[in-house]
Image: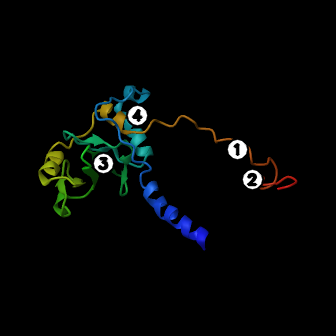
Amino acid sequence: MIRTARALPLLLLLPALLTACGTEKADPGATREPTPTTTQGRAELDERLRALGMAPELVYVTDVPGFTLAQQSVGVNGDDGFSASYWAKDGAVLHLYTERGSAADCPEGYVCRAPEKGQVVRIGGEKVAPAVLRRAADAVHRPAPEELAGLLPPPRTATAPVERGDLPSYGDGAPDNHVGEGG
């Protein structure tokens, strides 16, 4: 009972510590290292987007002074849309979502734009003034190839399966969990 009582505060603290995982933020003054993707053409970048599950025509970005793209936030929205978040040093966060649809169904608290027929870009945020949301929505644009290359994760290069040392070469391929003498 005493041991459990001592462990309880640590167990309650664990979720708070884990929520900080994956929140790496880029230095807004830093520039990305040039990658091999910056030399890729638009067709190659569009193919990478499709491989990630995003429709290239639904990829839009914005530029708002004081906000920096959170690289780990870039991903798929819905079936084949796009999503990204931008952060500011004061803790404000902008969320950009694109999908197929109409700006007529804009949810409360968002600013929506329809850059093309059948496409909608929604801008929302946390701790963001409505004027900043409108400014972000007005700055929505299709990324240039260099900008798009900076959004995407590096292309996968390994095509061979990873070799595991614990799989036997015989039988059903289950891991070898044999324990030797004494343990």
* Marks 3/2: CA–CA distance: 41 Å
Quadrant where the image shows the C terminus: bottom right
Of callouts 4 and 3, the N-terminal one? 4
Residue picked out by circle 3: 85
Residues under numbered marks 2 and 4 in contact, where contact means CB atoms less than 8 Å apart = no
Residues under numbered marks 2 and 1 in contact, where contact means CB atoms less than 8 Å apart = yes
* Marks 4/1: CA–CA distance: 32 Å
Q: Quadrant of residue 145?
A: top left
Residue 118 can be seen, yes or no: no
Q: Residue at x 26, y 50 (%)?
A: 93
Q: Amino acid at mark 1?
A: Arg
Of callouts 2 and 1, the N-terminal one? 1
* Marks 2/4: CA–CA distance: 39 Å
Compared across the picture, whether 106 is left or right of 168 comes to left
* Marks 4/3: CA–CA distance: 24 Å
Residues under numbered marks 4 and 1 in contact, where contact means CB atoms less than 8 Å apart = no
Image coloring type: rainbow
Q: Which mark is residue 44?
A: 4
Of callouts 4 and 1, the N-terminal one? 4
Q: Residue at x 60, y 74 (%)?
A: 1
Closer to viewer: mark 4 or mark 1: 1
Of callouts 3 and 2, the N-terminal one? 3
Residue picked out by circle 1: 164
Residue picked out by circle 2: 175
* Marks 1/3: CA–CA distance: 37 Å
Q: Amino acid at mark 2?
A: Pro
Q: Residue at x 37, y 57 (%)?
A: 79
Q: Position of residue 41 (x, y in %)?
A: 36, 29
Secondary structure, mark 2, is loop
Residues under numbered marks 4 and 3 in contact, where contact means CB atoms less than 8 Å apart = no
Q: Amino acid at mark 3?
A: Ser
